[in-house]
Amino acid sequence: MAAGDFYFAINATFRFIYGRWGEEALIDYWRALGREYYAELSRRFCKGGLEEVEQYWKDYFKLEPGGVVKITRTDRAVVIEVQDCPAIRWLKGAGRKVMPSYCRHCFHVSSAIAEEANLVFELEDGDGTCRQTFRSREGKAC
Amino acid sequence: MLGVQDFIGYYDWTFEYLRRKYGEKALSAYWEEAIAFDSQHHAYELVKNKGFEGMAEYWGHTLNAEEAGYTINKTRDFFRIDMFDCPSVRFLVRRGPSPGSESAKGPSKDLLIKHSQGYYHDYCEHCMGWVKPIMTRTGFMVDHEHNHQGQCWWEMHRAGAGSRRKSEPPLRGPQDVRKLKAWRRGEHHLYLSSLRVTEMD
């Protein structure tokens, strides 16, 4: 199991970039992270399709410390229902002040990953409970 | 979601992102402000309130959680860590060279374990980047050396008149990482009394 205290650094990194350079800079950082650092993941999704998306996130959440997540796949989409987000739980449990826009990183990082894989990403809700969807683009293929 | 299981990978990437977009000074500010006194605020509080005992409490917990190979040696005069298997460097070496790094341009094993295996050109520097500000603010000095191979030693001692060190401390017993054959490998960066001394190949 990975060390949960690293969530502190993720939260602090967002706060630092936002505090120094503003919201646009933070969004630029998230999108660059998705596009560059996760380029190989986009290639995996592109090659393996929704089956790969489903398997990746199932494996991923198994290794995070805690959280309750349900992942389902249909013909056109993979839906990740986060009932108890491990990051938000860890930060709040430690009494940390969570960046107000913390949950937006999921939208921007995963959108960038999805775009490179010719998928669409959608995010609903946040603050510990959310629904994330990776959807196939109609009539398009990698 | 950004999880903690691959944190080291994008932490390293973030160093390079901040450097290329905002410069080295901004990266140093990131280590000091965001990591030392925000992310690691709990470490600062422990060291400030409990000194060497707080260091033992913080690193005992953290290094266990990260599954590091290390020993801790706490005396009246210093607090010491000998790290013989750094979990972060282990992660970066297992992951392999980042796209575009010097290591990625060729299959050389030697290059793979030089300190350019990551996105940022010198991943190991981040530890001094956040540890030193905490120690300075709490009245301690840091002696430290790393070899970019997953091995390093740290010795914190109280700052004060006559406390500045001009040479490495003596060997500290059988657990001293400097006694390992592998210690001389790699490129060494040495700090004495919180100041960078030299680079030794």
Image: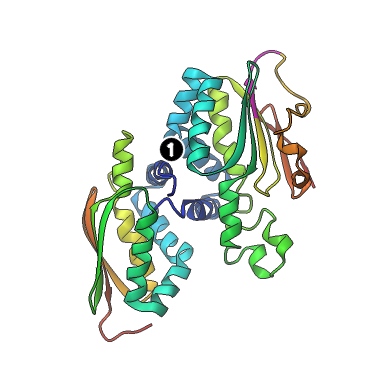
Q: Amino acid at mark 1?
A: Ser
For the record, the magenta segment spans B155-161
Relative image position of residue A39 (x, y in whole percent): 46, 68
Q: Quadrant of the C terminus of chain A?
A: bottom left
Query: Which residue has dot 1 on it?
Result: B39
Residue drawn at (71%, 38%) of the image: B177
Q: Given the current orientation, which residue lies at the most extreme front position?
A: B174
Relative image position of residue A88 (x, y in whole percent): 29, 45
Relative image position of residue A114 (x, y in whole percent): 35, 70
Residue drawn at (29%, 50%) of the image: A67
Left or right of B108 on screen, residue A21: left
Residue B145 vertical placement versus B23 (above, below): above
Residue in the foreground of this view, choosing between B168 and B23: B168
Magenta region includes residue B76: no
Residue in the foreground of this view, choosing between B178 and A49: B178
Residue in the foreground of this view, choosing between A23 and B106: B106
Residue drawn at (38%, 62%) of the image: A59
Residue drawn at (72%, 14%) of the image: B162
Q: Given the current orientation, which residue lies at the most extreme top position?
A: B161
Left or right of B196 on screen, residue A138: left
Hey, which quadrant is residue B45 in on the image? top left
Label 1 Cα neighbours within 10 Å, binned few <14 / some 14-19 / many ≥20: many
Relative image position of residue A102 (x, y in whole percent): 31, 48
Residue B44 vertical placement versus A128 (above, below): above
Hey, which quadrant is residue A139 in on the image? bottom left
Chain for disc number 1: B
